[in-house]
Image (cartoon, rainbow, N blue to C red):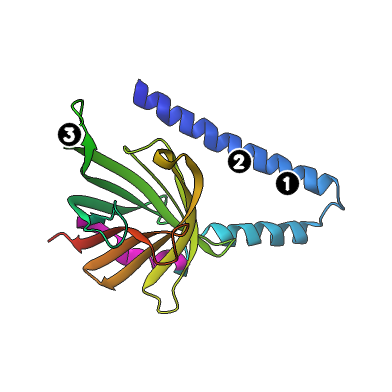
Amino acid sequence: MQKAGLVASGFVLGAAATIVGGAAMLRGLESATQPEPPDMQAMMQKWIETIKPGPGHVALETTVGNWETTTKIWMGGPDAPPTSLAGTSKRSWVLGKRFVLEESKGQFPMPDSTGQMSMVPHDGIGLTGYDNFRNVYVGCWADTLGTQLLTMTGTPGADGTSFTSYGSMDEPMLNVIGRTVKYKLSVVDPDTMVFEIFDLHAGDDYRVVEVTYKRAK
């Protein structure tokens, strides 16, 4: 019943979004000259073209698959020795190849009740896609190390093998809201990817996280 409720909620939200969008379009049409049928057909065709998966989505194909991950975290800054953590990642197409869903699993050091550091399970999920209307890559991320939903937008690199995005991240330990960060995903070869996070408040090249993906055999 719980699962059915979630599915129903998702359907209702999706239907509501469609109704709201349609109502807004109708209000816009009412306030202007009613378009002739050929014009309406052209408007609808323009919208239809934006919802089809295209080259921007195809470029994400190489990121799909099952991966073994090695995460390095520079908690003391880029000059300090990093903490290295092992994990796994599953990246698969969803919503008719419009988005890549990533499901990651691993461990992360956290203080226990005695104040000693111990490993706890760390799960995360994210979506990456291409917005045909805005011509940008879009993504979001959530995991068990926080309750914030991270969002980012960006463009592919000139070499065609990297994707750079920007977003903001809250830092509760420093009582900071909206810290600007840069995300870079580099496809090294068909079986290797590197994902990096840079804290732009500290510097353009202030890397705080690096995740190396190796395709699982």
Q: Amino acid at mark 3?
A: Gln
- Magenta region includes residue 67: yes
- Judging from the image, what secondary structure is the residue with disc 3 in? loop
- Judging from the image, what secondary structure is the residue with disc 1 in? helix
Q: Position of residue 152 (x, y in %)?
A: 48, 54
**Residue at which label 2 appears:** 18
Residue found at the far bottom of this picture: 159
The boundaries of the magenta stretch are 56-70
Is residue 160 in view from this perspective? Answer: yes
**Residue at which label 1 appears:** 25
Residue at (21% x, 58% y) in the render: 81
State whether residue 64 is above or below residue 122.
below
Q: Amino acid at mark 1?
A: Met
Residue at (38% x, 71% y) in the render: 162
State whether residue 1 is above or below residue 100.
above
- Locate the C terminus and report the quarter of the image it occupies: bottom left
Q: Amino acid at mark 2?
A: Thr
Badge nearest the viewer, 2 or 3: 3
Residue at (65% x, 62% y) in the render: 46
Question: Local crowd at mark 3 within 10 Å, few (<14), some, or many (≥20)?
Answer: few
Marks 2/3 in contact by CB < 8 Å: the verdict is: no
Q: Which of the two labelled residues, at mark 1 and mark 2, occupies the earlier sequence position?
A: 2
User: Which disc number belongs to residue 204?
Assistant: none
- Magenta region includes residue 177: no
State whether residue 20 is above or below residue 32.
above
Q: Quadrant of residue 61?
A: bottom left
Q: Nearer the viewer, residue 112 or 40?
A: 112
Q: Position of residue 4 (x, y in %)?
A: 38, 25
Q: Position of residue 41 (x, y in %)?
A: 70, 59
User: Which disc number belongs to residue 116?
Assistant: 3
